[in-house]
Amino acid sequence: MKWIVAVIRPEKLTDVKQALAQAGVGKMTVTNVIGCGQQGGYTENYRGAEMEINLVKKVKLEIAVNDAYVDITVRTIMDTAFTGNIGDGKIFVLPLERCIRVRTEEEGPEAIG
């Protein structure tokens, strides 16, 4: 079992969700986040004053998958979130030690599915 965390552009969320659903991955948690990375930020005019915005809006996807779905999940996110520009995002794959479905008390891969 793996815990996949992806930080992507907000405008790519709908496309990524649809592509993941077609790949058989439909369960995820989505959070609006702000942060900075290689993209660094941008400059904006606000009420006549120039402001440097160094925290950029992103979307964080958190997806628990069984080992058989790791590669397809990562590849789908990469292919769908790609624009070729700085700020496309990052994907982190972490080991998932334990997963428990609260309603049924199932554990392990059955709890993810």
Image: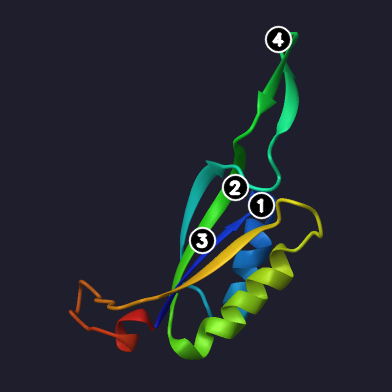
Task: Decide if residue 79 is on the left or right side of residue 105.
Answer: right
Outermost residue, top side: 48
Q: Residue 52, percent across and down? A: 68, 24
Outermost residue, bottom side: 68
Q: Residue at x 68, y 70 (%)?
A: 78
Q: Between residue 67 and residue 28, name the one nearer to us.
A: 67
Q: Describe the element under mark 2 as helix, strand or loop.
A: strand
Q: Residue at x 43, y 85 (%)?
A: 66
From the image, tell me which residue sits under label 2. 58
Q: CA distance from mark 1 to mark 3?
A: 11 Å
From the image, tell me which residue sits under label 4. 47
Q: Earlier in the sequence, mark 1 or mark 2?
A: 1
Q: Residue 28, percent across and down? A: 46, 66
Q: Earlier in the sequence, mark 1 or mark 4?
A: 1
Residue 19 is at least partly visible in this image: no
Q: Residues within 10 Å of mark 1 (few under 14, many from 20)?
A: some
Q: Residue at x 66, y 52 (%)?
A: 9
Q: Residues within 10 Å of mark 3 (few under 14, many from 20)?
A: many
Q: Quadrant of the C terminus?
A: bottom left
Q: CA distance from mark 1 to mark 2?
A: 5 Å
Task: Decide if residue 47 is on the left or right side of residue 22.
Answer: right
Three-letter residue code for mark 3: Leu
From the image, tell me which residue sits under label 1. 9
Q: CA distance from mark 3 to mark 4?
A: 34 Å
Q: Describe the element under mark 1 as helix, strand or loop.
A: loop
Q: Between residue 28 and residue 83, name the one nearer to us.
A: 83
Q: Residues within 10 Å of mark 4 (few under 14, many from 20)?
A: few
Q: Earlier in the sequence, mark 1 or mark 3?
A: 1
